[in-house]
Amino acid sequence: MADQVVDSVPSYSSPSSTSILNKLPTKRIDAAVTAAAESGIPEQGEQTGGHNPTYAHFSHLPFLPLYSQAQHDLLAKQQALKEQRVKHMDATDPDKLLNGSQKATLSVVGHLSGGGSIVGVKRWERRLKGASVIASNRLMEQNKLIVFTRWTVPTTTPSWFVDVLEYRFLDPGSKMGWNVVMLKAGLASFSSAKKDGKVKLKLLKTDAKGLKSQKLWTKRWNYDPCEAVTFIDDDGKEVPMEIVARLQRACSSLEAQEVQKRFKKQWVVPVL
């Protein structure tokens, strides 16, 4: 069902900032540090997705916005912090402080007296400081995926919804891969979902039990995206839910955290 609602989205990955100093030769370290130092705020990922045609009559209902002004502010703040680190790093960079003749002279002296090692030490200091610049840059990279999906039980009247937010972290470079899944159910007081006003849902191999309307449920699991949600009725019967709509976008860690915060503290699932 999910692939009928929205096209697949490619994985976003790049080398882990925590391992880059251990794996790269010194010239490539310098190049990576310089590239991170000179880069600006990356362009935000494009939102894709849409409604399942079967539930087009619900298209007027609000959806959790995947963009916000707060995200722009967070990215700008992170860029400013990175630039301050770059200034501090460049302030002691021997390749910027010394001109060509000075470096050549020191190199000759270094062969005779070992004085050239001073430059080598300074360059390694720059590389170590550059690791924080690379890490700061990584926080802004559009290498995560945030997915918002609305589900419903096709046989229930009146209709009620379960909104699911997924944060998919895919970084093969660091051999990490896990998803954060957050959900809320929107149940009206007259809902026929459950007699006691609570619902039980099954997501993959995990059960979300005793959910009241607008109550947050969250879980972290490895790798598998949430492509199936099942409603368990009062008689224990399993009823597969269907996707009403799905929206997703590539984003940075900072942006994903902002979306999760809004979903947790502010988002209210529409109730018919």
Image (tube, rainbow, N blue to C red):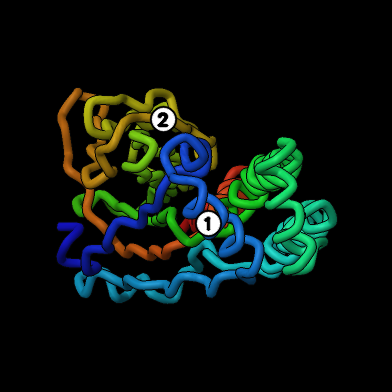
- The correct choice, above or below, for 48 with respect to 193 in the image is below
- The correct choice, above or below, for 89 with respect to 115 in the image is below
Residue drawn at 16 percent across, 32 percent down: 238
Residue under label 2, please give it.
220
Residue 17 as seen in the image, left or right of residue 199: right
Q: What residue type is labelled 2?
A: Arg
Residue 116 occupies which quadrant of the picture? top right
Residue under label 1, please give it.
32
Residue drawn at 25 percent across, 36 percent down: 231
- Where does residue 237 sit, x and y in percent of width and height? 15, 29
Element at label 1: helix
- The correct choice, above or below, for 252 with respect to 170 in the image is below
- Where does residue 223 sit, x and y in percent of width and height? 28, 37
- In depth, the one of 121 and 110 nearer the eye is 110
Disc nearer the start of the sequence (2/1):
1
- The correct choice, above or below, for 207 with respect to 16 in the image is above
Q: Nearer the viewer, mark 2 or mark 1?
A: 1
Residue 230 occupies which quadrant of the picture? top left
- Where does residue 175 sit, x and y in percent of width and height? 33, 34
Element at label 2: strand
Alpha-carbon span between mark 2 and mark 1: 32 Å
- Where does residue 66 sit, x and y in percent of width and height? 52, 64
- Asked whether residue 189 is in view, the answer is no
Q: Which amino acid does label 1 sit on?
A: Ala
Residue 134 as seen in the image, left or right of residue 24: right
Considering every residue shown, the one lying at the far front of the view is: 112
Characterize the local packing of mark 2: few (<14), some (14-19) or many (20 or more) Cα atoms within 10 angstroms.
few
Characterize the local packing of mark 1: few (<14), some (14-19) or many (20 or more) Cα atoms within 10 angstroms.
many
- Quadrant in which the N terminus appears: bottom left
Residue drawn at 30 percent across, 56 percent down: 11
- Asked whether residue 143 is in view, the answer is yes
Residue drawn at 50 percent across, 58 percent down: 270
